[in-house]
Amino acid sequence: MLALKIGIYGGTFSPPHLGHLAAARAAAKRLELDRVLFIPAAIPPHKALPEGTPSGEHRTAMTEIMAQTLEVESGIPAGVSDMELKRSGKSYTAHTLAQLREEYPEAELWFLMGTDMFLTLHQWYDPASILATAKICALARNAGEGADSLEGQKRRLEETFGAEIVTMTVPDLVDISSSEIRALLAEGGGREYLLSPVYGWILRHGLYGTHADLKHLDLPDLRACSWSMVHQKRVPHIRGCEEEAARLALRWGENETEARRAGILHDCTKYLELEPQLELCRRYGVELDELERVAVKLLHSKTGASIARYVYGENDRVCSAICWHTTAKENMTTLEKILYVADYIEPNRDFEGVERLRKLAYEDLDRALLLGVETTIQEMKDRRLPIHRKTLLARDWLRSRGVRTEEEGHV
């Protein structure tokens, strides 16, 4: 059996930026890595953390967004370790690699680094241990970036320590430092160098001197904040729901911007566990029935609506659409119907009957809503799960108005 090949990418990640992502992606492809592990440093040995550096928790959370993005976009398993943040003292690479060797005794470890770090590697704490434990991949921005120095350092480390080293160029490596990005952020710029959800995390928490008014965000910043609240595998669905809601709003004469804002925020609390969901309900005075108090999947619509209102300043129409996008209800507004249906039929959805539902959504919104509601009811019955009373009321309300499914409409 071939040994597991793990890429180790350390740094302060303050903040993690597109250059880090490009480097990790390129190294994983070139080295055929089975996994990439990002490790935020607590106290870097080679430099002091600048004043105002976010906590390890913030840097870990932003790096986790980057790891999830790498995995979603490239299919390369990736994760984040807080081992250096948990360890006291300076974050020496030799200690980190020794710990990883204990955890993965049979793995082939590759330590990934930029050219500046690579050229000083022989001066690090215990370089012999580092080079005996891991192979090195040095990443340059272009073929001409210190080529002679890189080759000379490669020979020196191979001859002195018996190191195994690969040097490679990454043409799309962002030619900007983290310190420059931090300065741009403090001046209201810098987002073009960051993943959108990383930028959203920074805005939400006021990091690096940002002072966003969360209750008056434009659509790009609202997307960034929303995407920073979920696992990155959920983002394609959220994007799809936003675009579908906008198309349906144009079709049925609704406010496109409100449809977009509802779509952007509808799943913002999707990944909270039961207790955090209940805590938000207590904080914002959300009344729950017996089923909602124990069914975590029903709560994100209620808590998402509360976050939309109290954190992002959304109006009643948007918040109500978010509140009912999971269960539906009686007497739904057009915007509420649109978000419910958009969530069901957005382009990433793939289930039997979805094409029929997509077609119907642009022909008769009420019939599409009824089909969605009845599909949900049947699914709950098939899975022997309780059906929320509001879903049953939605069905009965639609039927009382003479709405019928497609087959019934042709009888």
Image (spheres, rainbow, N blue to C red):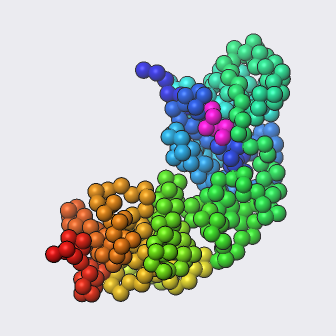
Residue 268 at least partly seen: no
Q: Examine the rendered structure and indicate whether residue 178 appears above or below residue 36.
A: below
Secondary structure mainly formed by the magenta segment: helix
- Which residue is at a point 49% across and 23% down the rendered structure image? 3
Image coordinates of residue 164 in percent, x first then y, are 66, 18
- Which residue is at a point 54% across and 41% down the rendered structure image? 74
Q: Between residue 174 and residue 231, name the one nearer to us.
A: 174
- Extreme residue toward the top, this view: 159
120 falls in the magenta region? no
- Which residue is at a point 36% across and 65% down the rendered structure image? 358
Q: Examine the rendered structure and indicate whether residue 70 appears above or below residue 392.
A: above
Q: Quadrant of the C terminus?
A: bottom left
Q: Quadrant of the N terminus?
A: top left
Image coordinates of residue 23 in percent, x first then y, are 67, 37
Viewed as shown, does residue 287 lie left or right of 351? right
Viewed as shown, does residue 404 lie left or right of 187? left
- Which residue is at a point 68% across and 21% down the rendered structure image? 165
How many callouts does the rendering have? 0
Image coordinates of residue 380 in percent, x first then y, are 25, 66
Q: Examine the rendered structure and indicate whether residue 277 appears above or below residue 394.
A: above
Query: What segment is highlighted magenta in the picture?
Result: 22-27
